[in-house]
Amino acid sequence: MCGIVGYVGEQQALEVVLGGLRRLEYRGYDSAGVAILSGSDLLVERKAGKLANLEKAISEKELAGTLGIGHTRWATHGPPTDRNAHPHQDCAGKVAVVHNGTIENFEVLVRGLEERGHARRSDTDTEVVAHLVEERYDGDLAATVRSICKDLEGSFVLVVAHQDEPDLVVAARRNLPLVIGLGDGENFVGSDVTAFIAHTREARAVDQDQVVEVRRSGVVVTDLGGTVVDGETYHVDWDTAAAEKGGHEFFMLKEIEEQPAAVRETLGGRMQEDGLLHLDELSMSDDDIRQIEQVVIIACGSSYHSGLVGKYAIERWCRLPVQVEMASEFRYRDPVVGRSTLVIAISQSGETADTLEALRHARAQKAWVLAVTNTVGSTVSREADAVFYTRGGPEVAVASTKAVMAQLAAVYVVGLYLAQVRGTRDTDEVRAHLADLLEMPDLIQEVLDRMGPVRQLARELQDAERVLFLGRHVGYPMALEGALKLKELAYISAEGFPAGEIKHGPIALIEEGTPVVVLAPRHALQAKLVNNVQEVRARGARTIVIATDGDESVTPYADTVIRIPDTKSLLTPLLTIVPMQVLSAEIARARGLDVDQPRNLAKSVTVE
Ligand code: F6R
């Protein structure tokens, strides 16, 4: 949460920094600000609200200079006002600091600073760093930041500029993401690679408790003791176009359209010529795989829903017990994991604090942790024992769509690979399932091509107060996902249930006209689902049924039928998810809401 960017080079820093902030705005949009070193003056501009407010406020101002830092905020300490917007400054206005994270001991530090005569100008924890730089700076900004980091508790990424340092931006990292962008005569730091992807694709990750000195001529990384440390650079494949809206009104609508490609990318290159899987990336020998006794999947939000689908697939194909745990709960209940446990940590961003802490806990218990993530170089990818990259491409909209789709494809692939190696499915069956998976991008496209009636339905449902989603088997996690999407995008109270559960309580929520979306693609539980549709309709529900082409069993009880093509029942989430995404986005649009940046949310949730 919070996006940060820093730049030193030959270009006008304001443009570079604002460009980075535009791409990082998904990380928080409570306020935005920049500091530009203009001649010998450090000019700071900041504004509450979205980045557009800041851009408007500075449109008439002269902010020329080739060194700059910027911030987009998701508020933690202090309300989202101009006064609390970053960058924060010291008393003399010579230092500017942007920060992602929370400084847990800031109150103690504030008291000391006030006793020593510093005046506080914001309610933030961040401001202490600016004053500490003011006190300790003696001509070596990197050494100053190193010394301050030793006194800070909590999680932080800091980026600091000083008026007396015309060729230096200093950044530091603990627990939160920071990436270096390596250019030619210019260098960058950012919360993720999208901060500088328009300028360079060469990146370097920063490790825990490291400080980065960014100059035009190069970058030096040290530990807190000042010793220079090496690090690996990597090339980022994502292109700039993928991080632009491409003619769509919202990123989310574009990202929904990109889902066939996301699944193709996730599957691509993972199959051998003999039609079987080849997953070196698991870094596990066949013997290790055969010794797995249980699988535990940890994730949050939509990624958790992908994990639930993974449970159905892995249990079916591998005959292994699978638990799926919300990462935020995992480590606090003393879970039983050990050497024979495969833990799969699913995270689009690879930076979710809950997932990261759960991963660390699992590793400490000696479990083998496989990260399934979309983000190369993310903390989760670096701390796990092995990584399966989902290759969904950059996802900018806060609500996850194509990344979830890619995760679903990933859990199927991992499940089939485990079955292949453990011999719980014979090779012909694995080949057949893979062949089915390879058809999914075209089928997803077919669903996308039929979304006209769903858009119409969105207009009809835009004033609904409550919507229920029902599913069975793999339809249940997708019912949860449908409800989550509607809540977060349209602010409509929505809940997902296993269809068989509603008679145990939730059916009381149904009134005349309550919309109930039932995921009823053709599968073994079809007859039971048809009963559930009848039950809710008998209580006055407006039934919206997602059904397979040609299946007429539900039509007598459905007020609206949304058709999807036929596929194997285990793979139906890849299709049923699409109309629910479109429905939520279109309802939000009809209600005049910001589809890409729903209120109170941030894409990368780096606080516990
Ligand atoms: C919902 C959504 C969130 C994320 C969750 C986990 O649309 O995007 O629920 O799925 O915050 O994020 P990652 O996958 O980055 O760990």
Image (spheres, rainbow, N blue to C red):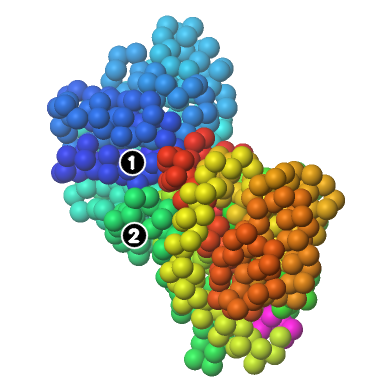
* Span highlighted in magenta in the image: 418-424
Q: Give whichever of 450, 26 is nearer the camera.
A: 450
Q: Residue at x 54, y 89 (%)?
A: 275
Which residue in the protein does label 1 denote? 21
* Quadrant placement of the C terminus: top right
Identity, as a three-letter code, of the amino acid under mark 2: Ala
Q: Residue 263, percent across and down?
A: 48, 71
Q: Residues within 10 Å of mark 2 (few under 14, many from 20)?
A: some
Looking at the picture, does residue 328 appear above or below residue 388? above
Identity, as a three-letter code, of the amino acid under mark 1: Leu
Q: Residue at x 21, y 40 (%)?
A: 15
Q: Give whichever of 18, 98 is nearer the camera.
A: 18
Q: Which residue is drawn at 51% across and 81% down?
A: 439
Asked if residue 283 shows in the view, the reply is no
Q: In this view, does 405 lie to the left or right of 146?
A: right
Which residue in the protein does label 2 denote? 242
Q: Is residue 353 magenta?
A: no
Q: In this view, does 262 lie to the left or right of 472?
A: left
Question: Going from the N terminus, do you reach mark 1 or mark 2 first?
Answer: 1
Q: In which quarter of the image is residue 410?
A: bottom right
Looking at the picture, does residue 135 appear above or below residue 398? above
Q: Is residue 336 left or right of residue 553?
A: right
